[in-house]
């Protein structure tokens, strides 16, 4: 539910152009030439001004076709060495995927769960707050179809639901500027105390904390805000979030069923990445109800952090997002239009990879830590999952990035 240990974001001057395909705020090597069918295109979205406001007009260079061939043997060995070293350093199990124009690598290392099973590249885990990138893409997809106006109040699309939207617009919600705070620890404890309970929408809404700021006034990381965005999608599509996500966001990227919004009626595909020590939820309760980390957590998390997936599916979806297969290049530019602290509308900008521009999201739940990061200059995607909360997924991704540069 709550995302902890989040990657540091860039601090850029207001008005700086964020370039997906050109580094922002720092020098870098020239990017590779665009694919023949992927010209440079600029977004024309207007930008607010003031502290924390969005940067001006990102420039998009779409990725080429999704790679399907394996990387060469030496590269694969270098990537596997990174995971093996991470496990030797204390992580129970590490799962990862690396996608580059030269090919695909998927790997695993370590012990997956208390039964002592070896981790496998196909293991599925709760990707936690990376779900927000998917939910943002869904909202932008609906906006492209004219079903959602980003500058209308959230309440426009939540008719009949008792939700305090604080008067925030859809765009403010996407940018975490609704004025709503994050889920209280007391509520998280309640969710973990009853792992078999499937939460209903009214029950989830009843747990929302009251607003703490006027809409648009400040950035406040807020799971309740993204839960409401998921409800917006349900209301306008007249479909459960899992169905709307599948038809609008996952199927266009040809994502397999191992990447999904978890529900009370579906069973999350196995094999599962299980923790050895879980923390908030006992290891014995992990997977209760057929969802990760439990059906209670999954149904309470909704569009904020309720998804699960495997490394290859996660990385492949991100590649397709940046290839323009999920939303338009203009929508992608808006998703990555960050404020002065690197906070975007579903895609944040990271500064942990030197001068290499990086966009994506992190995720943290009981028993797992995740990172999805896209390097537009290099046309490269890395997904990492560790069966230990607050693991240093950033360092693992940085080491994988370094290995791919050899």
Image (spheres, helix red, strand yellow):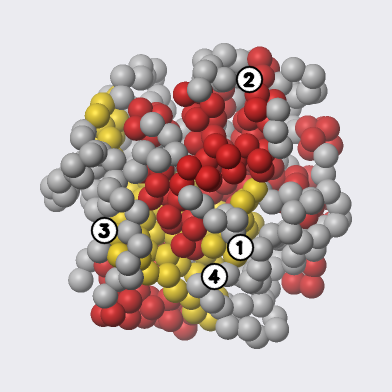
- Residue 43: % across, % down: 31, 24
Q: Is residue 314 left or right of residue 354?
A: right
Closer to the eye: label 3 or 1: 3
Q: Which residue is mark 3?
A: 101
Q: Is residue 120 left or right of residue 403?
A: right
Closer to the eye: label 4 or 1: 4
Q: For mark 3, does the 10 Å Cα neighbourhood hold few (<14), some (14 to 19), or many (20 or more) residues?
A: some
- Residue 40 got which mark? none
Residue 334, picture quadrant: top left
Q: Which residue is mark 4?
A: 122
Q: Which residue is mark 1?
A: 125
Q: For mark 4, does the 10 Å Cα neighbourhood hold few (<14), some (14 to 19), or many (20 or more) residues?
A: many
> Which element type, helix, strand or loop, lies under badge 1?
strand
- Residue 58: % across, % down: 29, 30
Point out the tag, 3 or 2, that comes first from the N-terminus.
3
Q: Is residue 54 left or right of residue 403?
A: right
> Which element type, helix, strand or loop, lies under badge 4?
loop
């Amino acid at each position: 539910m709550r995302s902890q240990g989040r990657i540091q974001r860039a601090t850029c001057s207001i008005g700086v152009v964020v370039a997906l395909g050109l580094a922002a705020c720092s020098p870098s090597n020239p990017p590779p030439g665009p694919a023949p069918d992927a010209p440079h295109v600029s977004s024309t979205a207007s930008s607010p001004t003031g502290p924390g406001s969005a940067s001006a007009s990102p420039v998009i260079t779409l990725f080429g076709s999704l790679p399907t061939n394996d990387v060469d043997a030496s590269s694969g060995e270098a990537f596997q060495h990174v995971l093996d070293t991470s496990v030797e350093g204390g992580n129970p199990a590490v799962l990862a995927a690396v996608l580059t124009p030269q090919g695909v690598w998927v790997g695993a290392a370590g012990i997956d769960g208390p039964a002592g099973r070896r981790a496998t590249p196909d293991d599925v885990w709760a990707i936690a707050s990376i779900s927000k990138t998917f939910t943002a893409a869904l909202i932008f997809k609906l906006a492209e179809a004219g079903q959602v106006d980003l500058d209308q109040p959230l309440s426009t699309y939540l008719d009949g639901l008792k939700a305090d939207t604080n008067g925030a617009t859809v765009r403010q919600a996407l940018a975490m500027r609704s004025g709503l705070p994050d889920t209280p620890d007391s509520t998280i404890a309640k969710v973990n105390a009853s792992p078999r309970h499937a939460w209903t929408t009214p029950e989830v809404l009843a747990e929302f904390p009251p607003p703490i700021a006027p809409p648009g006034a400040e950035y406040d990381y807020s799971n309740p805000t993204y839960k409401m965005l998921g409800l917006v999608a349900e209301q306008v599509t007249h479909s459960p979030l899992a169905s709307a996500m599948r038809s609008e966001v996952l199927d266009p990227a040809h994502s397999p069923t191992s990447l999904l919004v978890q529900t009370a009626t579906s069973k999350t595909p196995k094999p599962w990445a299980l923790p050895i020590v879980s923390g908030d939820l006992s290891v014995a309760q992990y997977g209760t109800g057929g969802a990760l980390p439990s059906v209670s957590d999954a149904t309470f998390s909704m569009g904020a952090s309720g998804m699960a997936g495997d490394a290859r599916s996660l990385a492949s979806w991100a590649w397709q997002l940046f290839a323009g297969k999920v939303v338009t290049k203009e929508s992608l530019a808006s998703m990555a239009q960050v404020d002065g602290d690197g906070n975007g509308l579903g895609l944040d900008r990271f500064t942990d990879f030197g001068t290499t521009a990086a966009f994506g999201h992190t995720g943290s739940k009981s028993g797992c830590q995740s990172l999805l990061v896209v390097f537009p200059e290099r046309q490269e995607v890395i997904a990492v999952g560790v069966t230990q909360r607050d693991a240093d997924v950033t360092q693992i991704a940085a080491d994988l990035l370094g290995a791919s540069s050899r």
